Amino acid sequence: APRVEPRLACFSSMLAATLSRPASRATRGLCARAASSLIASIDQGTSSSRVILYDAVTLRPVASHQVELQSATSNPQAGWSQMDAKRIVGTVTDSAAAALAAAGASASDVVGVGITNQRESTVVWDKRTGEPLYDCILWHDARTATTVSALADELGGQDALRATCGLPLSTYFSGVKLRWLLETVPAVKEGFESGTALVGTVDSWLAWNLTGGAGGRATRHVSDVTNASRTMLMDLWTCGWDGGLVRALGVGAAEGALPTIVSCGEEIGRVDGGPLHGAPLTGMIGDQQAAMVGQRCFGVGEAKITYGTGAFMLVNSGGAPVPSSHGLLSTALYRFGASAPTQYALEGAVASCAVGINWFKDSLGMIGTAPEISSLAAQVPEGTEGLVFVPAFGGLLAPHWRDDARATLVGLTLAHDKRHVARAVLEGIAHQAKEVTVCMAADTGAALTGLRVDGGVALSDELLQYQADLCGIAVQRPRDVETTALGAAIAAGLGAGVWSSIADIPSSGDDIERTFEPAICEEERTARCASWQKAVESSFGWARE
């Protein structure tokens, strides 16, 4: 997750700034009391990396540090998005050192390290040197559109592999990114053929480097079940790599370079070197699944949506995969313990959330900071006056899965100004999430009665009110919207034996900061959704071959 970057820096910097302020006497006391029992959560996203230290007894944050990564991202061609993989590791190391310093703690105080990460993003590296053989191809990169089209024709359609891996053929997933790397980058092909290359998602890349890297005595090449379930190479039922999927995607040369699949919570290895040296690595979980854990969505039917770079909605679907016939993804949710059963989820992935806000800020220059978009939108309380924005910058994901769609602003008149565009951008996010809730109700046979939210963009009151209006249900925002890092901390605590089961995890208590109730009638809701559908249809077919 995608992430999404679920932690939009412009919004979440408010939380980061709070946590990085010089400690008061009371805070320093808390740090001192907690220093002998900390959980380190590594939260690696699309636009930043950070480490949050949690008190292992209370699960309250003690200290954190965040380093941006947008400067490490490049876009060599339209639709391409890649990141310097070594910068990913460097920003994690820097964040860990600064967080420990802020807490007055050391690695010996850390009882468990958890990793949560942007999913699907793919790295290939030389195991002898630790050098990446190409930049990390990011989850929302669309360079593989031709590859996906060819595979769909060859295999019998976009859903040809869904029955095994739970996913449609899409540029989104790691398997087709790996296919492109094999076909396009000579060093990658040569590395796999000679047995010197390894491949993995960002969790694998971080775990390999943290546990020793090249020349390490006990380096681990692993991926957890949630990240593995986003590659199109894992059998969702057995939670193991599937040779048939590997061959179908044409990546057989890399089969021996895939990581070992582990659970989300177990002793995976020991950190070898750096500020966390000697601490046990005990948790790994994809960012959107981590947010579900952080929100304590352990019951079947419980759902959340994370608003970040993208927007991701998941519902706990129980102890077996639930196939979707409405464009959603069947995915692993968590497995805590090597021999524990896997819990599953249905997911609706929306590619553009903060992406659209950043476009409004950086490309159009209509605001100076991301939160200003909410203030502008609030100035037109009666609505957009017919203006609709579809943020399909690199295509549409769930439920449409149209790689050929492009961002579309329709309904413009001379009466519109930037206030209306600002509201249309936020409503475009809410409309996409509304579509996903409809699909989830159709797949599960039960309508959602409420929705929990998190992620940096969830700090926008206007967005959440639009969401409640369009969905016709209550939307609840927790006091701490950064639940992804908390989910990784929970996974690490379970893996370290801090708690023996999810029933023992400290309660989140009364953590709802605000509930947003629907404020429009059903007739108005229906009209707005009809306009959205017309706008979505107008976004199709604009991508150049």
Image (spheres, helix red, strand yellow):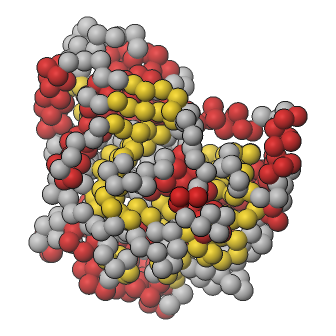
One can see residue 131 in this view: no
Q: State left or right for residue 496 relative to residue 2.
A: right
Residue 339 visible: yes
Look at the image and tell me in which quarter the C terminus lies. bottom left
Q: Residue furthest top?
A: 415
Query: Observer-nearest residue: 319 or 158?
Result: 319
Horizontal side of 520 relative to 89 (left or right) equals left
Vertical placement of residue 66 versus 121, above or below: above
Q: Position of residue 455 (x, y in %)?
A: 49, 40
Q: Is residue 538 or residue 3 the one in the foreground?
A: 3
- 503 left or right of 388 in image: right
Which residue is drawn at the image coordinates 43% and 33% (left, top)? 476
Q: Image point 76% across, 50% down: which residue?
A: 99
Residue 404 drawn above or below residue 225: above
Q: Residue at x 54, y 22 (%)?
A: 368
Between 291 and 196, which is closer to the camera in this rendering? Answer: 291
* Whole-percent x, y for residue 448 in the image: 27, 41
Q: Is residue 248 shown above or below 27?
A: below
x, y percent for residue 283: 59, 66
Where residue 540 appears, x then y in whole percent?
A: 16, 43
